[in-house]
Amino acid sequence: MEGWRGRIGLITPAGGSATEEVFNKYRPEGVAVYTTRIPLFHISYEGISKMRGYADDAAVLLAKAARADIIIFSCTAGSFMDGAGYDLELIKKWEELTGKPVTTTTTCVLEAIKELNIKSLNIVTPYSEEVNKLERAYFEDSGIKVTSISGALLSHPPDMNTRPSSDYYRYALMSDTPEADATFLSCTGLRVTDIIDKLENDLKKPVLTSNQCGLWGTLKKLGVLEKTPGLGTLFNR
């Protein structure tokens, strides 16, 4: 049976496939991944809020048609846009709607931060300035000091696929300070898994990414978490 150890249902913004690539490349044997896409037209509060309007149907589809054992809303900004605790409101709503365990990328990031005893973050994003401000507020209101938040300042989702991981490597190096316990590369649309180990080696501190944390948190809830080369300190403690 496909997914005999667990079936993950992904709700992910249309236009990119980074989450699916990471989940399918690094999933343990016996874990299956199923995806439903929802439209994202603009990297702004309005655009991301509009995208979330499609997520209820996506969650039900994954629960009923794909028979997912757990569902993850794989969109970092979509689960932090309305402030600290909003990710938990989304989880409650979708668990009631589907009868399945649910998590979000932002929830998984906070769990990873707690797991690694991180108190302060250097955040690197592709987001617009508007969304960066909302992200800073989310983490600071959640008790995490944000030492810096910087990045590509993009507004159109297709532009995310035009920036190589080397750009985000440089952003992370340039914005790092001794005050930051870790670096977080935020956004499930980024293809940055290949630089996790390189950055950890060069910065001498943990590096988190949205998809790495999402996979870690989902596998942990399924009870099938394994040490995995290439996914940094979080997966190899």
Image: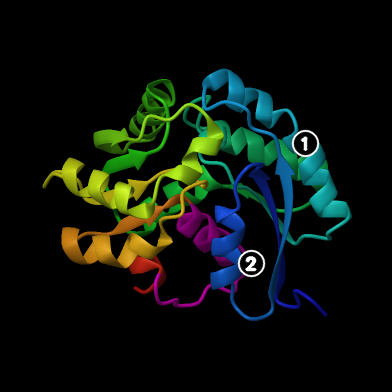
Residue 144 lies in quadrant: top left
- Measuring 38% from the left and 39% from the top, which residue is drawn there? 125
| In the foreground, 38 or 93 | 38
Instruction: For mark 1, give the secondary structure.
Output: helix
Q: Residue furthest right?
A: 65
Dominant SS type (magenta): helix
The quadrant of the image that shows the C terminus is: bottom left
Please name the amino acid that badge 2 sits on: Leu
Please name the amino acid that badge 1 sits on: Asp
**Image coordinates for residue 70, horizontal then vertical, percent:** 70, 58
Against 17, is 193 above or below?
Answer: below
* Residue 215 falls inside the magenta stretch: yes
Residue pointed to by mark 1: 56
Residue 204 seen from this side: no
Residue pointed to by mark 2: 222
Q: How is the image coloured?
A: rainbow
Q: Which residues are magenta?
A: 211-230
Of mark 2 and mark 1, the one earlier in the sequence is 1
| In the foreground, 151 or 111 | 151
Residue 195 lies in quadrant: bottom left
Does residue 211 appear left or right of residue 196 in this picture? right
